Image (spheres, rainbow, N blue to C red):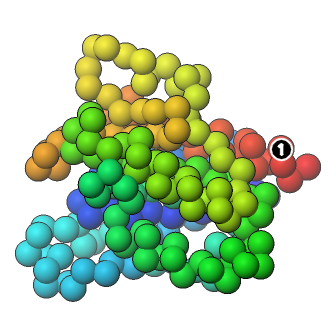
Amino acid sequence: MIKVLVLYYSSYGHIEAMAEAVAGGARDAGAHVHIKRVPETIPSDVAAEAHFKLDQWAPVATIEDLPGYDAIIVGAPTRFGRMPAQMAAFLDQAGGLWLSGALHGKVGAAFTSSASQHGGNETTLFSILTNLLHFGMVIVGLPYSHQGQLTLDEVVGGSPYGATTIAGGRGERQPSAIDLAGARHQGELVARYAIKLAV
């Protein structure tokens, strides 16, 4: 059975919710899925004072986990138009995997959130995807088979480069049904491509 890792960082729970939707889509496609998060690099007292969501249930990943999966879907919020330091610090430890080619040919994808519609969703996706391409991974985005990203009836996330959500300037907006549907669809597509590549 294909193994998929949904690897995420979430300060306030928005990306955690998207990760669960991505994982659900991959499971629906027949994959065995693990959800893991990267370590928090901010001191715990500072994180608590900033009201970070500290009760996340997903286990913390290690770099050594990554080669054990057929596909890796990476999610992180935008920080000034790029991935946050927590995710970057984790991926920066993967030099040995890059050198050995341990991730070559595996399927990769990205998802993100931002405070506003134009707050860096796409550049953050590219900052994640750039890493995955350097690792030799085969990239899957979120094509317009997810028609929800075309709606004009409400504010929605979504991009052909990956699933996204809009959190609001104070984190007041949780992922909408359309955002979560996009995340599920992307997870399903990643698993389906991984299954095809494994044949």
Instruction: Using the rendered image of the protein, determine whether residue 58 is visible from the camera's viewpoint.
Output: no
Residue at 39 percent across and 59 percent down: it is: 83
- Quadrant occupied by the N terminus: bottom right
Q: Which image quarter: residue 63?
A: bottom right
Element at badge 1? Answer: helix
Question: Which of the 4 image quadrants contains residue 185?
Answer: top right
On the image, the x and y values in percent for residue 165 come to 33, 40
In screen coordinates, is 167 left or right of 142? left
Residue 75 visible in the current orientation: yes
Relative to 175, say whether 143 is above or below.
Answer: above
Residue beneath disc 1? 196
Q: From what the image shows, is residue 66 above or below residue 34?
A: below
Residue 79 rendering spot, x and y as whole percentages: 29, 58
Residue 78, percent across and down?
Answer: 32, 53
Query: What residue lies at 49% left-to-right and 69% top-to-bottom?
Result: 36
x then y, percent, for residue 11: 26, 64
Describe residue 51's horizontal placement relative to residue 39 as left or right.
left
In the image, residue 30 sits, relative to residue 47, either above or below, namely above
User: Tag 1: residue type?
Assistant: Lys
Going 43% across and 22% down the picture, which residue do you hit?
148
Relative to residue 46, is residue 68 drawn left or right?
A: right
Assess disc 1: are there few (<14), some (14-19) or many (≥20) residues with their C-alpha within 10 Å of its C-alpha.
few
Kindly give the residue lying farthest to the right in the view shown: 199
